[in-house]
Image: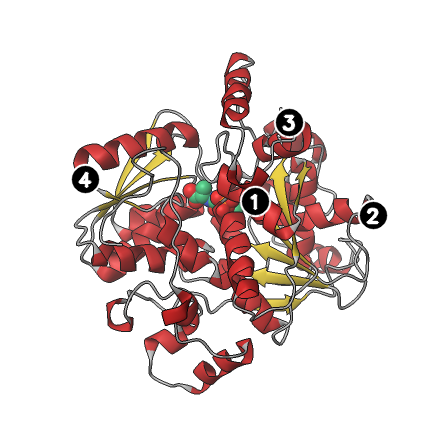
């Protein structure tokens, strides 16, 4: 608790936060958390993360750093359901892009900043595909006591995210290389300069991300869905979600654990391959490390590098791989992958039915559509997709999708398997002429 330590000094594996639940003060039923809704003026009751403080009780209330994160939107998405091949009333979207920095990361960052203060950290660092850096930068700016450095890959970050990090005033270091390069370096730099690490290998971050699941249960009026579907990148979310359900079940606060589907982009499909092809499993904690190492060696020797329009999840070596395998075991989970075309089309459909999301997030909806077609998910099961990031994070790709011809689009994203805009909404260009404008409107 009082050390900024994220890996076991003996075996090098990641650490978990565990609690002595016998000392925790918990409501008898999840409904008990409703009491927080009526509390006015308490920042902890207002935060969608800390209203569940009792389920992540690693810090005393007066030590918590919060900006009011987690007040996100849970929607019964009847207008998106047909695209996902779900029946009416059965598809739900959890819009985590509605967080203050525009992504789910804030759920975790409030917990990580809280821990950073507990250990007396004076400076923080992260590697990022964009959202982690935006969130770290925002907390650093609001908090004002922990300056931060962010490492991002060159040319690998969506403009909305880069804009945030620059504007919030943190030091942005663009490293020539991709996210995996940055991830490797950030650990070295954090050790060398004794900086507090804000990536999801920090177990406290995952504690905050558990609350996304609590809010989904809250959205279903304290019932659990049949499926939770989430995009998989560095696999922090999926790891946290599994832990959340496992804890709730063992505390007797839920009676069953929903199944989890983790969706990879086809161009960044390490988890998919490890689980479905290599058949590597959690195996009660005895994960076959040698086979994972061999898998990565082969990946290097074939020069296979992650490549997807969903830049947030363009990741080769997910740091939470083993924790995710554990979560898959706990949730009877599965892994699917979807192509970039499916991701962009699903993203357009999400926008038409609601508030929108960034490309990586839409992998979840594309994943449901695919799992429905395969019959893995039934049309009447209750399915919740976690939409991880805000639509304005990556405006370039959205504008390209809607303004380019199919040929131009396929050309711009050559090598990504994008064929065109199935749901393109092209602006109509007209002269400054009343008749032309009217004709364009009525066409
Ligand atoms: N969706 C979005 C919008 C993300 O930004 C990320 C991860 C993920 C999904 C994947 O989540 O890692 O929990 O499996 N973004 C990280 C970043 C890597 O640096 O912002 P995960």
Label 4 neighbour load within 10 Å: few <14, some 14-19, many 20+? some
Q: Does residue 159 appear in the picture of this structure?
A: no
Q: Residue 363: x percent and y percent?
A: 63, 45
* CA distance for labels 2 and 4: 50 Å
Q: Is disc 3 in contact with disc 2, using a CB cutoff of under 8 Å?
A: no
Front-most of 91 and 210? 210
Rounded to the nearest angstrom, the CA distance separating label 3 from label 1 is 24 Å
Is residue 368 left or right of 329 when viewed as pictured? right
Q: Residue at x 74, y 66 (%)?
A: 78
Whole-angstrom CA distance, mark 4 to mark 3, is: 37 Å
Q: Position of residue 366 (x, y in %)?
A: 69, 46
Q: Does ligand 1 reach within 8 Å of label 1's beta carbon?
A: yes
Comparing marks 2 and 1, which lies closer to the viewer? 2
For the residues bearing labels 4 and 3, Cβ distance under 8 angstroms:
no
Q: Are marks 4 and 1 in contact (CB under 8 Å)?
A: no
Q: Tell me which numbered mark, 2 or 1, is placed earlier along the sequence.
A: 1
Mark 1 crowd level (few <14, some 14–19, many ≥20, 10 Å Cα): many
Label 3 sits on a secondary structure element that is: loop
The residue located at (22%, 58%) in the rendering is 118
Image mark count: 4
Q: Earlier in the sequence, mark 3 or mark 2?
A: 3
Looking at the picture, how far across and down is residue 165, in whole percent? 33, 47
Is residue 176 positioned above or below 400 on the image?
Answer: above
Residue 44 image position (x, y, % from top left)? 35, 74
Assess disc 3: are there few (<14), some (14-19) or many (≥20) residues with their C-alpha within 10 Å of its C-alpha.
few
Number of the label disc, if any, that sits on residue 360: 1
Look at mark 3 in the image and give the residue it sits on.
278
Q: Which mark is residue 194?
A: 4
Separation (CA) of disc 2 from disc 1 = 23 Å
Judge whether residue 367 can be spotted in this image.
yes
Residue holding disc 2: 375
User: In what element is the residue under mark 4?
Assistant: loop
């Amino acid at each position: 608790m009082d050390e900024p330590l994220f890996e076991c000094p003996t075996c090098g594996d990641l650490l978990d936060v565990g609690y002595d639940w016998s000392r925790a003060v918990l409501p008898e039923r999840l409904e008990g958390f409703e009491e927080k809704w009526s509390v006015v003026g308490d920042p902890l009751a207002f935060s969608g993360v800390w209203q569940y403080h009792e389920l992540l009780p690693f810090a005393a209330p007066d030590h918590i750093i919060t900006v009011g994160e987690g007040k996100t939107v849970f929607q019964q998405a009847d207008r998106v359901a047909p695209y996902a091949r779900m029946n009416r009333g059965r598809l739900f979207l959890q819009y985590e892009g509605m967080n203050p920095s525009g992504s789910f990361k804030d759920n975790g960052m409030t917990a990580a900043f809280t821990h950073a203060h507990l250990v007396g950290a004076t400076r923080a660092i992260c590697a990022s595909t964009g959202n982690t850096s935006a969130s770290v930068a925002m907390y650093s700016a609001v908090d004002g006591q922990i300056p931060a450095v962010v490492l991002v890959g060159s040319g690998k970050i969506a403009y909305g995210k880069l804009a945030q990090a620059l504007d919030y005033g943190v030091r942005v270091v663009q490293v020539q290389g991709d996210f995996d390069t940055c991830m490797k370096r950030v650990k070295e730099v954090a050790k060398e300069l004794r900086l507090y690490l804000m990536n999801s290998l920090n177990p406290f971050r995952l504690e905050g991300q558990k609350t996304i699941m609590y809010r989904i249960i809250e959205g279903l009026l304290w019932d659990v869905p049949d499926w939770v579907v989430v995009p998989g990148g560095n696999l922090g979310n999926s790891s946290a979600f599994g832990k959340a359900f496992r804890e709730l079940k063992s505390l007797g606060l839920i009676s069953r654990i929903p199944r989890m589907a983790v969706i990879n982009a086809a161009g960044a499909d390490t988890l998919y391959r490890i689980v479905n092809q290599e058949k590597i499993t959690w195996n009660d904690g005895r994960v076959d490390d040698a086979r994972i190492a061999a898998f990565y060696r082969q990946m290097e020797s074939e020069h296979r590098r992650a490549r997807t329009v969903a830049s947030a999840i363009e990741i080769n070596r997910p740091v939470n791989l083993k924790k995710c395998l554990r979560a898959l075991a706990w949730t009877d989970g599965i892994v699917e992958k979807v192509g970039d075309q499916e991701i962009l089309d699903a993203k357009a459909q999400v926008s038409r039915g609601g508030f929108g999301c960034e490309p990586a997030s839409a992998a979840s909806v594309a994943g449901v559509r695919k799992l429905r077609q395969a019959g893995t998910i039934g049309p009447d099961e209750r399915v919740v997709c976690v939409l991880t990031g805000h639509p304005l994070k990556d405006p370039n790709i959205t504008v390209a999708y809607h303004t380019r011809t199919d040929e131009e689009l396929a050309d711009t994203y050559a090598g990504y398997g994008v064929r065109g805009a199935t749901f393109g909404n092209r602006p109509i260009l007209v002269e400054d002429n009343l008749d032309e404008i009217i004709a364009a409107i009525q066409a």
